[in-house]
Image (cartoon, rainbow, N blue to C red):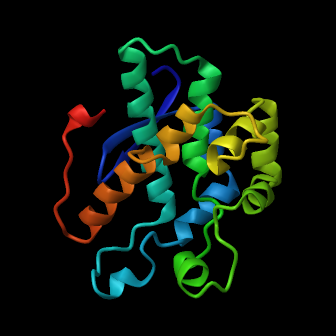
Amino acid sequence: MPGTCVLRDAVHGDMEFARDVEMETIDTSLVQRLRGIRQLGTASLVYPTAVHTRFDHSLGTAWMARRILDRLRATGASIDRQEYLAVIVSALLHDVTHIPFGHTFEDERRLFERHDTVGRFQQFLGDEAVASLLDREQLTDTVLGILTGSTTHSHASWQRDIVCGTICADLLDYLARDNYFCGLSQGYDDRLF
């Protein structure tokens, strides 16, 4: 891929990201703050090496999304640059609404609204750097639609399915990543793609 940045990952090996929009998205403070949020909360009290972050997971999700998109293209699917980019950027941003110990506070204790609501995504994607980037690339409505499933925002359901469907980039990354850092075995056949 021309103009790429290669990031080495413990789970997926070398992952390539385009130097333009993809790396710009990764470099925003909104995505960088995910470096401070553990993917598995307090699981490291039982599994001491389970200290991986939502940042690591977001990169892995984008990488899995790329593998799915590339496989679709290789089998003849017509996916234009804008559609492709919308999926990758959505994968990078899919966890930006998380807070530390969010699943405990949101799902179990119900102290805060869930991280995946339309309002919460609108608030976080309103971050100046991210909003500017999405507006410049004309991705705002599509990315919001992919991330929320909102019918008021334009998106294709196949794009949402890649990022957060039944068998999706999010799942493919966190199953492998969480198991790896907990010292458990987990594998899936590459034919899945």
The answer to whether residue 40 is left or right of residue 181 is right
Q: Give me the residue at 36% from left, 15% from top.
A: 75
Q: Give me the residue at 26% from left, 36% from top.
A: 192
The answer to whether residue 119 is left or right of residue 77 is right
Where is residue 148 drawn, in percent x and y?
Answer: 66, 50
Count of labels in the image: 0
Quadrant in the rendering for residue 25: top right
Q: Give me the residue at 62% from left, 64% from top.
A: 33
Where is residue 51 drawn, in percent x and y?
Answer: 38, 73
Q: Give me the residue at 28% from left, 86% from top.
A: 46
Which quadrant holds the C terminus? top left
> Is 11 situated above or below 132?
below
Quadrant in the rendering for residue 183: bottom left
> Is 127 situated above or below 160?
below
Q: Looking at the image, can residue 6 be seen? A: no
The answer to whether residue 168 is left or right of residue 3 is left
> Is 138 situated above or below 188?
above
Nearer-the-camera pick, 124 or 72 = 72
Where is residue 129 drawn, in percent x and y?
Answer: 78, 48
Toward the left, the furthest residue is: 185
Which quadrant holds the N terminus? top left
Where is residue 69 drawn, in percent x and y?
Answer: 44, 28
Nearer-the-camera pick, 119 or 177 = 119
Q: Looking at the image, can residue 157 be seen? A: yes
Nearer-the-camera pick, 141 or 98 = 141
